[in-house]
Amino acid sequence: MTSKEIFEQIKKKRSFLCTGLDTDIGKLPECMLSEPDPVFSFNREIIDATVDYTVAYKPNLAFYESNGEKGWLSLKKTVAYIRDSYPDVFLIADAKRGDIGNTSEMYARTFFETLDFDAVTLSPYMGKDTVEPFLRFPGKWSVLLALTSNPSASDFQYMEDGNGNYLFEKVLETSKGWGSVDNTMYVVGATKAEMLAKIRTVVPDHFLLVPGIGAQGGSLEDVAKYGMNSMCGLLVNSSRAILYADKTEHFARAAASEAKKIQQAMNVILRK
């Protein structure tokens, strides 16, 4: 999927929403716990309820790996369901991998061949050779951590060099030449929305994956104000606010309502 194809989906759905499938079995509605695979059954209902408002889904691998073999099976079934039912949806593995070249090659094969994701989140802080194996897969995307929304991001990402440039700016400047606007995007936390203007001076045309609206308190309006480009250039993620909007048997309906609310706000922004 190219950046233009992602943009076509954004225009079609009037949305740049990415729904995070951070499915915690400890937070599932009680009505789902009798299912043979509660995590997959929950995901399937969430996907069916929200797909009209969503251009991308982003399973967070930690929530599946923590359940061992059963978790991996839930993940595989979730990916297969999206591929079979909604093939135009962009699918991101939130894995945050980053290791030496031969290890990265195995990770790339895992996410792009075995699991058939479109994209995977990566830490670029070990350098180019840790990302290159992912960039060799045609039509697949590397989503590089640039500026994260966690409280301790300032420990390293805001370190300044002798010219007053932040470390995250150096990461952007160096890594933007590794791939292209059709296989590389960047993670920028919504709680750092005011920094998006600075980021856009370095990577004006790349897509940005922006977590942190909803439960983490980031502002959709600020993200759009500082981060949007002529092709939208944004995939804004919401996870908990959608997944756990309701804990009764009406959870899917509530998730749809929350996703629609975000989509409607995005539609207003896109019209502007």
Image (cartoon, helix red, strand yellow):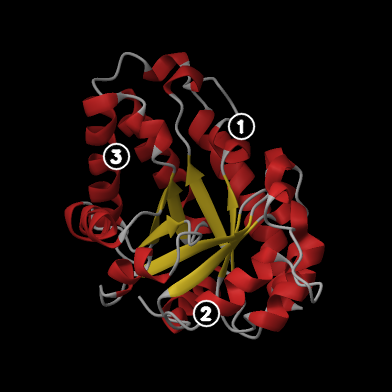
The alpha-carbon separation of the residues under discs 2 and 3 comes to 30 Å
Of callouts 1 and 3, which one flags the residue occurring earlier in the amino acid sequence?
Answer: 3
Number of other residues with Cα within 10 Å of mark 2, as a class: few under 14, some 14 to 19, many 20 or more: some
Q: Position of residue 165 (x, y in %)?
A: 76, 72
Dot 3 lies on which element? helix
The location of residue 175, given as percent across then percent down, is: 51, 75
**Mark 3: which amino acid?**
Leu
Residue for badge 3: 75
Q: Amino acid at mark 2?
A: Lys
In this rendered view, identify the residue nearer to me: 147 or 71.
147
Q: Residue at x 46, y 80 (%)?
A: 3
Q: Residue at x 44, y 83 (%)?
A: 180
Residue 245 coordinates in the image, percent (x, y): 61, 32
Q: Left or right of 65: which side holds 52?
A: right
The residue under label 2 is 176
Relative vertical location of residue 189 with respect to residue 16 in this rendering, above or below:
above
